[in-house]
Amino acid sequence: MGKSFEQYQRRKLISSYFSVVLSIGLVLFLLGVLGLLVLNTNKMANHFKEQITLSVFLKDNAKEVEIDQLQKSLAMAEYTKSATYVTKEEAAENHSEEIGENFLDFLGYNPLKNSIDVNLNADFVSPLQIEEIAAELTAKNYVDEVSYDEPLVGLLSENVKRVSFWILVASAIFTFIAVLLINSSIRLSIYSKRFIIKTMQMVGATKTFIRRPFIWTNIKLGMLGALLALMVLIIALLYLDKNFPELGLFRDSSMLIGLFGSVFVLGIFISFISTYFATQRFLNLKTDELYY
């Protein structure tokens, strides 16, 4: 009879631990997915920003040395991702391919100008910054004009801010919910041992002594839950990378390591905090209050 009861208690304990690990793993996996979304949203936003082209059109009387000097200075500028010199002949050829016919045969001359196409780094793609760069370049006497899609820049900057704001709000709300879910699972686990806690306290054990094994046990459960979440997250990333290689999910290894490390540390931290306050609550209860 005693052996059967002991086996029942062991199964109940294992079931309790399993449910805690599973709930922690599920919540941390969802947090990892959200973190991955946040990081890649920023990457995608930067990708689109860096597709904005600033075309610096040069006057026909611009000297070759001036053009060469301008291209080199643009290539070395902190706001430049790439600077490509395009001759008027190359521009005409590209335009003819786009419209499907040679417009030079119709006009009889080439009205296009030599230019330098500049792709900016994402940090400098904003209406104000691009306007300042364009004004600086236009001031050069051999530059005819600087052209870029101004409405698109404004729309892109506005939408990126809006999307980033709502993703941050969603991240904050979801993190709060995740903490509550993990905290509830751990509190339920400790609730089943509330009489043991009170018995230990009544025989003279200090609060620190009573808390220590609970905290250490749940930290280990938090670590197991985090490892479970990371395993599932890696499998999901491998699947997405295989089916959507253009996303380049494994290109930034330092970002992924940081994300995985954050998920693991978060699992430990939440488990520690939740266990501490859950045990503290039952330690502060009176004996007759344990039944409610």
Image: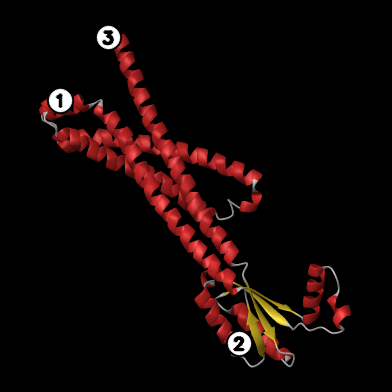
Q: Observer-nearest residue: 102 or 142?
A: 102
Which residue is at 61% across, 70% downward?
Answer: 52
Q: Residue furthest right?
A: 105
Considering only vertical position in the picture, is 52 above or below 261?
below
Q: Secondary structure at mark 1?
A: helix
Q: Observer-nearest residue: 284 or 180?
A: 180
Report the side of 188 relative to 70 (left or right).
left
Amino acid on which the number 1 mark rests in the picture: Thr
Amino acid on which the number 3 mark rests in the picture: Gly
- Residue 138, labelled with which disc? 2
Q: Secondary structure at mark 3?
A: helix
Image quarter (top left, top right, bottom left or bottom right) of the C terminus: top left
- Residue 133, labelled with which disc? none
x%, y% of residue 219? Answer: 33, 38
- Earlier sequence position, callout 1 versus callout 3: 3
Q: Observer-nearest residue: 244 or 8?
A: 244
> Are the two marked residues, 2 and 3, in contact with CB atoms closer than 8 angstroms?
no
Which residue is at 59% across, 69% downward?
Answer: 152
Q: CA distance from mark 1 to mark 3?
A: 21 Å
Considering only vertical position in the picture, is 221 above or below 136?
above
Q: Observer-nearest residue: 157 or 238?
A: 157
Which residue is at 38% across, 28% downward?
Answer: 19
Residue, disc 1: 199
Residue, disc 3: 2
Report the side of 32 relative to 283 (left or right).
right
Which residue is at 79% across, 72% downward?
Answer: 94
- Earlier sequence position, callout 2 versus callout 3: 3
Q: CA distance from mark 1 to mark 2?
A: 82 Å
Amino acid on which the number 2 mark rests in the picture: Thr
x%, y% of residue 89? Answer: 81, 79
